[in-house]
């Protein structure tokens, strides 16, 4: 029997009937066509399916869709608005991807990390990404991408108040 749930996905409220056994990742990919969230394993180990749930990185293959009722889900499709999010830009600039299969999950985990820690050490970055696997890059370029994203986001935060002051003078 289906359950009726309401959840907010990428800023839009959705009312859906879902089977209680449906995983969030399958709801996103199959019902809503949000295929930027990938499935790379069936053991909740690869992290390719990572999305933000109320701002925190969650493996969407490890969460039932009904558990997401009433919560805000953000997928890679919505991260940057009309352009690239600074984390996406940094992965592009620093060659933090090759085939790109792991990249949406890496990026969502990075967004969560940088929301909590604006200036992580290399060790903290590697620790945060330990639930995300990459078969291609050897990880160093991913770590470099996260460092570059952190620096860019700190710069934006520092310059924002100055711009706001300039706009009022
Ligand atoms: Fe591998 Fe979710 S698909 S952790
Ligand atoms: Fe291919 Fe990470 S870029 S799996």
Image (cartoon, rainbow, N blue to C red):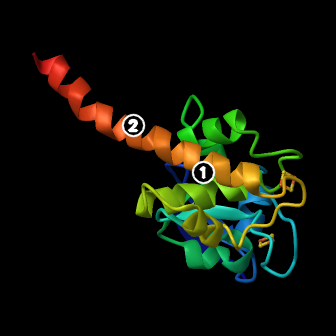
Q: Is residue 160 above or below residue 19?
A: above
Q: Residue furthest top?
A: 169
SS class, disc 2: helix
- How many numbered discs? 2
Quadrant of the frame with the N terminus: bottom right
Q: Which residue is mark 1?
A: 146
Q: Position of residue 23 (x, y in %)?
A: 73, 74
Q: Is residue 124 above or below residue 21?
A: above
Q: Position of residue 133 (x, y in %)?
A: 80, 66
CA gap between label 2 and label 1 equals 14 Å
Q: Which residue is at the front of the view, 5 or 116?
A: 116
Q: Residue at x 38, y 35 (%)?
A: 156
In the image: residue 138, left or right of residue 53:
right
> Mark 2 near mark 1, Cβ–Cβ under 8 Å?
no
Q: Which residue is at the front of the view, 50 or 164?
A: 164
- Image quarter of residue 24: bottom right
Crowd class of label 2 (few under 14; some 14 to 19; many from 20; radius 10 Å):
few
Q: Which residue is at the front of the view, 63 or 102?
A: 102
Q: Which residue is mark 2?
A: 155
Q: Position of residue 155 (x, y in %)?
A: 39, 37
- Image quarter of residue 83: top right
Q: Earlier in the sequence, mark 2 or mark 1?
A: 1
């Amino acid at each position: 029997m289906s359950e009726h749930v309401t959840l907010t996905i990428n800023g839009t409220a959705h009312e859906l009937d879902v089977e209680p056994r449906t995983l969030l990742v399958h709801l996103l990919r199959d019902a809503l066509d949000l295929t930027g969230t990938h499935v790379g394993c069936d053991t909740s180990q690869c992290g390719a399916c990572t999305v933000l749930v109320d701002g925190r990185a969650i493996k969407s293959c490890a969460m039932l869709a009904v558990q997401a009722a009433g919560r805000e889900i953000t997928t890679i499709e919505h991260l940057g608005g009309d352009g690239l999010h600074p984390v996406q830009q940094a992965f592009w600039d620093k060659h933090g991807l090759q085939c790109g299969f792991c990249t949406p999950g890496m990026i969502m985990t990075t967004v969560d990390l940088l929301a909590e820690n604006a200036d992580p050490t290399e060790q903290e970055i590697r620790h945060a990404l330990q639930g995300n696997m990459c078969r291609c890059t050897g990880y160093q370029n991913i770590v470099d991408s996260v460092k570059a994203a952190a620096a860019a986001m700190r710069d934006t935060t520092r310059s924002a108040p100055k711009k706001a002051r300039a706009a009022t003078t």
